Image (spheres, rainbow, N blue to C red):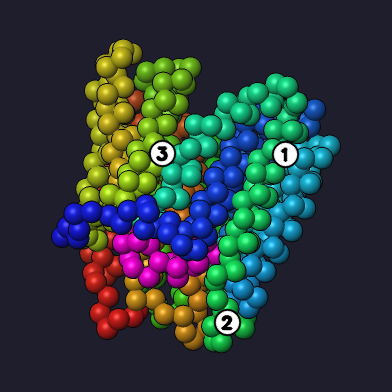
């Protein structure tokens, strides 16, 4: 089950022109992460904008709108090529940035973030599609994709300090501008290095695939968030039912229409959704429970939840997953995520009075979930493209779009839905918290029992999907 004792070296992954292109992608991911953190830090202190009731829509608008436009991203990749796709998306993004930076009211921030969401959707599939094509060797591909997670950890360490300085000296608008400059520099570097990518196949799709299904997924997730915001029992039940409907109907349809007859990519999409729902669900529980059981100020909870991406980044960046076979990774994730969720229930039921030792169990949960994410995240993306051929109008960007959609939906299920369910229960009583944590652990156990038996974890037969 163990594939190799060593992962490809960083020197191998960064060698030559493809290494320069990978470096450009990593720089862009770093800038995008910094940008997102900056907006989260700025909006609460932008007093002159008013419209506090629009704060939540301002933070979620980009993610929801991006889903609606993902299908267009895969189409652009095949029709005009990744460089033109990049500049189209960047032009739209600049419009959104201009609107948010000059916004006279919070409504303009929401509109600007929605336009940025359009830009994000237009970029869908480009990064994963290009990287999967550059690295034909699956271990090298996994090593390259694993480095992306590191670019999400570093900004969390650097950005808050820089934002604090800029915010105190120059104000909140400047705090929005400096990440945009960094982002543009990354995009320019990316455009320069994308010249090594060849033209799209002659069989590239001539139409946008599954556009209606993607819009339906976006509308469904928006509806779930509205239902959660009602903070009523009916609203929470409607949110749960809405997620089930989104997964059973438009999500399933979007995956199948984007990559028809590619069962391996379909399986990767569902597995990726479960990976993200597991990880973000657990990271949602930790700070909420910590604030109730250990430290009402939230400081300890913030430290605990920071262990999750730290462990994720270290494991992904080290290439540990590339040393392990697919079956081993399936076993690790199928055991670790449900056990971590189960430990949360144990923590709730056995939590001692607030003390330094009270954080031992949640710290272990945070590290376990980060390690599982670190091996599973790049592995699933890698396996999706084993034996992948660009034919019948299907490009690698279509596979990338399936993974991006699955990540967004999985994050919404794990973070948004569980936050809505957990918050009122945490306020009510300990037994209710334990029941929810136990139910989540059982759900993950059932989901991973099914996912671990997927054909995704088996070698490709016949050389192609």
Quadrant position of residue 342? top left
Q: Nearer the viewer, mark 3 or mark 1?
A: 1
Percent position of residue 450, x then y: 26, 61
Percent position of residue 177, x then y: 72, 39
Question: Would you name the residue on which mark 2 appears?
Answer: 205
Question: Would you name the residue on which mark 1 appears?
Answer: 177
Can the viewer see residue 176 in this picture? yes
Q: Is residue 461 magenta?
A: no
Local packing at callout 1 (Cα closer than 10 Å; few below 14, some 14-19, many 20+) is some
Local packing at callout 2 (Cα closer than 10 Å; few below 14, some 14-19, many 20+) is many
Query: Residue placed farthest to the right in the image?
Result: 104
Quadrant of the frame with the C terminus = bottom left
- CA gap between label 2 and label 3 equals 37 Å
Q: Nearer the viewer, mark 1 or mark 2?
A: 1
Question: Would you name the residue on which mark 3 appears?
Answer: 309
Percent position of residue 57, x then y: 66, 43
Residue 248 left/right relative to 204: left
User: Looking at the image, is mark 3 or mark 1 earlier in the sequence?
Assistant: 1
Residue at the spot x=46%, y=39% of the render? 153
User: Looking at the image, is mark 2 or mark 3 earlier in the sequence?
Assistant: 2
Q: Main secondary structure of the magenta part?
A: helix
- CA gap between label 3 and label 1 equals 26 Å
Can the viewer see residue 373 in this picture? no
For residue 226, above or below residue 176: below
Quadrant position of residue 383? bottom left
Range of residues picked out in magenta? 126-142
């Amino acid at each position: 089950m163990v594939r190799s004792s060593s992962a490809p070296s960083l020197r191998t992954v960064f060698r030559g022109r493809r290494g320069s292109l990978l470096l450009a992608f990593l720089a862009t991911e770093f800038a995008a992460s910094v940008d997102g953190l900056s907006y989260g830090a700025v909006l609460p202190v932008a007093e002159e904008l008013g419209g506090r009731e629009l704060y939540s829509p301002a933070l979620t608008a980009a993610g929801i709108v991006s889903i609606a436009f993902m299908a267009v991203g895969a189409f652009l990749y095949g029709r005009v090529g990744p460089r033109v796709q990049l500049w189209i998306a960047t032009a739209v993004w600049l419009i959104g940035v201009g609107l948010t930076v000059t916004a006279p009211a919070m409504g303009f921030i929401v509109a600007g973030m929605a336009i940025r969401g359009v830009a994000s959707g237009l970029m869908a599939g480009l990064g994963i599609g290009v990287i999967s094509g550059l690295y034909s060797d699956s271990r090298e591909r996994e090593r390259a994709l694993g480095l992306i997670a590191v670019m999400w950890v570093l900004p969390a360490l650097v950005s808050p300090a820089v934002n604090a300085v800029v915010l105190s000296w120059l104000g909140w608008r400047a705090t929005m501008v400096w990440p945009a400059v960094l982002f543009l520099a990354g995009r320019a570097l990316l455009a320069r290095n994308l010249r090594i990518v060849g033209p799209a196949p002659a069989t590239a799709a001539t139409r946008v695939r599954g556009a209606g299904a993607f819009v339906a997924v976006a509308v469904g997730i928006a509806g779930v968030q509205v239902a959660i915001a009602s903070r009523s029992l009916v609203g929470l039940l409607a949110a749960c039912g809405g997620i089930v409907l989104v997964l059973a109907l438009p999500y399933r349809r979007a995956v199948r229409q984007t990559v028809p007859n590619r069962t391996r990519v379909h399986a990767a999409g569902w597995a990726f959704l479960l990976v993200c729902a597991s990880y973000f669900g657990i990271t949602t529980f930790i700070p909420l429970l910590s604030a109730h059981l250990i430290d009402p100020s939230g400081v300890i909870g913030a430290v605990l939840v920071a262990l999750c991406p730290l462990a994720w980044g270290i494991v992904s960046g080290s290439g540990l997953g590339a040393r392990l076979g697919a079956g081993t990774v399936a076993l690790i994730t199928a055991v670790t995520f449900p056990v971590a969720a189960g430990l949360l229930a144990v923590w709730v039921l056995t939590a001692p009075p607030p003390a330094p030792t009270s954080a031992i169990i949640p710290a272990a949960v945070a590290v376990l979930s980060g390690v599982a994410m670190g091996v599973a995240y790049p592995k699933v993306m890698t396996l999706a493209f084993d034996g992948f051929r660009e034919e019948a109008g299907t490009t690698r960007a279509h596979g990338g779009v399936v993974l991006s959609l699955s990540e967004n939906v999985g994050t919404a299920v794990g973070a948004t839905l569980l936050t809505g369910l957990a918050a009122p229960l945490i306020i009510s009583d300990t037994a209710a918290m334990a029941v929810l944590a136990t139910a989540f652990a059982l759900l993950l156990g059932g989901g991973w029992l099914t996912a671990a038996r997927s054909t995704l974890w088996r070698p490709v037969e016949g050389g192609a999907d």
